[in-house]
């Protein structure tokens, strides 16, 4: 895509934009932090001009003589950014499914880039307003994609930090008058320079007119205006509820120019996700294991509140624990392959543990021992053992835990 | 060869002016030939003894420094010496200042960072330690770090390391600005100046 083009070497051509930024500061139209942010945009990074430019008249006096600056250094900065951006884009591209999401994100990045080029050429440019609505069922990748977008916008120099602050009603709404505004403002402050991700946004509107949720929405709307240049607010949740929420808050809709729909994953996509997750953790589903998982997902994905990729992750997480139990418990010789393989019985046992007896695919029922009352205790003990052996360490803990 | 410029930038009251003066003394400057550049472009210069310079130019009132003031330094680089004009700037705010004079001084400071060979970005480590990164650092600090990222001559100076809260502050600054060069200093007690001097000599 065109926005991968390394930023053009800055020359005298960017001077008017620079001058305008300084004038905006001096005349009080923008604050210094916004000014530096615009400098990043105009310069395409920490690049320094290789050519002396004239400072804006009136503010600085005679321009000091400057030596030419090694161009390599400037190129380095732009290059590093470009690499980071590429990385994030590649990460998104390798996520199975999400076709329309990927398209929308590319559109967004292209638009941001063009606004920047226009600003550099001193053409009228809209400051990007980056507030968004994410509609989708649980586990469809909303939070994951939001994180990636944050990184991309940082690497493009739009957001200064690009981090994600995830909040829900309880983080914003307080218990007495004034408390809500204070809590909401605190979260906004934490999110400045990045993304404020409001999960299940409609829960802010659940209590009717007198509910403090309304106050939270008002504070958010104000912040979306005041910090529009360096904060992206994303409202996320189930599609139908989001629609109802937005209909009831027209003031919000007009400030949310970007809407991204996250459809449920098809079974094949869920399996690709499973493969990817296994691969990232150096595990592998055997063919039978994969078939067992498919069987389960095909029925389960029709259930209300199906957790899409999150369900897949939870199953694999449990299956890995079950595999550990199997390997430790049976005293079989373990080789590299055995350590990597997730078998059908591991999947079945995992499903049984997570969803109960009834949900486990028929073939899975005979797989594992452990129906005795003592089973739970034994499981816990085995889990501790497995943990001690380092079998459960790794990417299953920490950030990835729900 | 033209004189290279180094700029000391940061929020108000982090210690930029005191650092500039004391660091110049550390580098052997006894009398400060300080040249001022007024926001309207006029230049003037004065000679001050170090103590007088500190008393006159640095202080707890925010925005005491309303114009660029610079001091010339000689730094050993390799076998020879290098001339550096160290420029102390007016504090950056996160908000639009009411006073037009201050705003102009800020614009002037920002203009400096574009072309300076050296950017010393100062933060108040004690304040960060006391009140955390959100209150202790400004949005503008993150913006400057982003602007200058990957520049060879860019370092963050974590100042006021003589104060108890600064140790914790330094940790926070390190984690907030991972990947940048961060040098702990005390402008008041001349701590960490050797490292700054090495960095400066290396960057020029
Ligand atoms: N304890 C301590 N105080 C400092 C240090 N550096 C500066 N200060 C104090 O912080 C205040 C602001 O200093 P100044 O140099 O005017 O800051 P500027 O606004 O960044 O130029 C003054 O009261 C200084 O005495 C330091 O390293 N330690
Ligand atoms: N397309 C995908 N490829 C790989 N993993 C995915 C994909 N979509 C979601 N995931 C994973 O599924 C889990 C849930 O996704 P998340 O982004 O939290 O969903 P949501 O926020 O929509 O509920 C996360 O572990 C995420 O990494
Ligand atoms: Mg989520
Ligand atoms: Mg000062």
Image (cartoon, coloured by chain):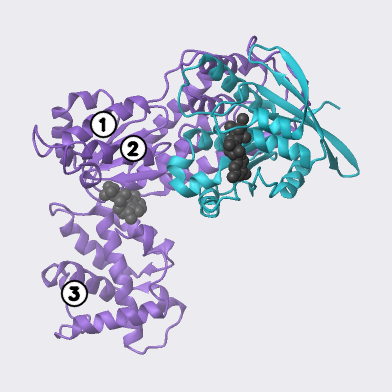
Chain colours: A purple, B cyan
Frontmost residue, B140 versus A323: B140
**Marks 1/2: CA distance?**
9 Å
- Residue shown at 52%/50% (left/top)? B169
Residue B192 at x, y percent in the picture: 69, 49
Residue holding disc 1: A219
Compare marks 1 and 2 and give the one earlier in the sequence: 2
Q: Mark 1 lies on which chain?
A: A
Residue B103 shown left or right of residue A203 in the figure:
right
Q: Please give the label number shown on residue A363.
A: 3
Could you say which quadrant of the image residue A101 lies in? top left
**Helix, strand or loop at mark 1:** helix
- Residue shown at 67%/20% (left/top)? A11
Residue A53 at x, y percent in the picture: 70, 17
Residue A274 shown left or right of residue B167 in the figure:
left
- For the residues beneath circles 3 and 2, the answer to whether they share a chain is yes
Number of residues whose C-alpha sits closer than 10 Å to that of mark 1, classed few (under 14), some (14–19) or many (20 or more): some
Frontmost residue, A158 versus B54: B54
**Marks 3/1: CA distance?**
54 Å
Do we see residue A370 in this rendering?
Answer: yes
Q: Please give the label number shown on residue A188.
A: 2
Residue A215 shown left or right of residue B2 in the figure:
left
Number of residues whose C-alpha sits closer than 10 Å to that of mark 3, classed few (under 14), some (14–19) or many (20 or more): few
Question: Comparing marks 3 and 2, which lies closer to the viewer?
Answer: 2
Q: Identify the residue at the far top of this view.
A: A58
- Residue shown at 62%/20% (left/top)? B108
Residue A284 at x, y percent in the picture: 39, 68
Q: Is the residue A226 above or below the residue A340 in the image?
A: above
- For the residues beneath circles 3 and 1, the answer to whether they share a chain is yes
Where does ligand 1 appear, by image quarter?
top right
Q: Mark 3 lies on which chain?
A: A
- Residue shown at 37%/64% (left/top)? A397
Disc 1 vs disc 2: Cβ atoms closer than 8 Å?
Answer: yes
């Amino acid at each position: 895509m065109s926005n991968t083009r390394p930023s053009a070497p800055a020359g005298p051509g960017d001077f008017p934009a620079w001058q305008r930024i300084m004038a905006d500061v001096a005349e009080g139209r923008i604050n210094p932090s916004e000014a530096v942010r615009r400098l990043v945009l105009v310069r395409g990074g920490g690049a320094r001009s290789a050519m002396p430019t004239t400072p804006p008249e009136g503010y600085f006096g005679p321009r000091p003589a400057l030596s030419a600056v090694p161009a390599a250094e400037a190129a380095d900065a732009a290059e590093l950014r470009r690499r980071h951006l590429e990385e994030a884009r590649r990460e998104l591209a390798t996520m199975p499914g999400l076709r329309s999401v990927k398209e929308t994100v590319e559109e967004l990045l292209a638009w941001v880039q063009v606004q920047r080029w226009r600003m550099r050429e001193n053409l009228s440019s809209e400051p990007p307003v980056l507030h968004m609505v994410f509609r989708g069922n649980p586990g469809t990748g909303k939070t994951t994609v939001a994180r990636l977008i944050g990184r991309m916008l940082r690497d493009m120099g739009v957001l200064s930090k690009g981090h994600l602050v995830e909040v829900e009603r309880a983080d914003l709404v307080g218990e007495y008058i004034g408390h809500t505004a204070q809590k909401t403002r605190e979260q906004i402050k934490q999110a400045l320079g990045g993304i404020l991700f409001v999960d299940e946004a409609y829960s802010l509107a659940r209590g009717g007119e007198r509910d403090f949720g309304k106050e939270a929405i008002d504070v958010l709307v104000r912040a979306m205006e005041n910090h529009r240049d360096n904060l992206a607010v994303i409202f996320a949740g189930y599609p139908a509820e989001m629609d109802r929420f937005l209909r009831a808050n027209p003031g919000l809709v007009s400030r949310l120019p970007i809407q991204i729909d996250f459809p449920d994953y098809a079974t094949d996509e869920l399996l690709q996700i499973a493969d990817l997750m296994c691969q990232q953790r150096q595990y592998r589903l055997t063919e039978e294991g994969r078939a067992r998982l498919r069987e389960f997902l095909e029925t389960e994905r029709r259930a209300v509140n199906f957790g899409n990729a999150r369900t897949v992750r939870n199953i694999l997480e449990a299956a890995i624990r079950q595999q550990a139990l199997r390997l430790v418990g049976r005293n079989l010789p373990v080789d590299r392959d055995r350590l990597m393989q997730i078998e059908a019985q591991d999947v079945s046992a995992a499903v049984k543990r997570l969803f109960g007896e009834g949900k486990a695919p028929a073939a899975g029922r005979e797989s594992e021992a452990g129906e005795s009352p003592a089973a739970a205790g034994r499981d816990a003990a085995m889990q501790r053992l497995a943990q001690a052996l380092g079998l459960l360490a790794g990417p299953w803990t920490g950030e990835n835990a729900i | 060869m033209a004189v290279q410029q180094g700029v000391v930038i940061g929020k108000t009251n982090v210690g930029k002016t005191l650092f500039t003066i004391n660091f110049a003394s550390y580098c052997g400057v006894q009398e400060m030939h300080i040249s001022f550049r007024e926001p309207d472009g006029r230049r003037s210069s004065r000679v001050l003894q170090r103590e007088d310079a500190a008393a006159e130019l640095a202080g707890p009132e925010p925005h005491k420094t309303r114009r660029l003031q610079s001091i010339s330094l000689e730094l050993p680089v390799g076998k020879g010496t290098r001339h550096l004009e160290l420029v102390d700037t007016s504090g950056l705010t996160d908000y639009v200042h009411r006073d037009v004079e201050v705003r102009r001084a800020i614009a002037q400071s920002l203009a400096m960072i574009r072309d300076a060979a050296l950017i010393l970005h100062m933060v108040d480590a004690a304040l960060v330690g006391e009140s955390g990164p959100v209150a202790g650092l400004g949005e503008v600090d993150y913006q400057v770090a982003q602007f200058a990222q990957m520049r060879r001559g860019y370092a963050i100076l974590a100042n006021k390391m003589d104060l108890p809260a600064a140790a914790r502050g330094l940790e926070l600054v390190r984690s907030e600005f991972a990947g940048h060069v961060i040098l702990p200093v005390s402008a008041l007690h001349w701590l960490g100046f050797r490292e700054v001097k090495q960095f400066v000599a290396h960057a020029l």
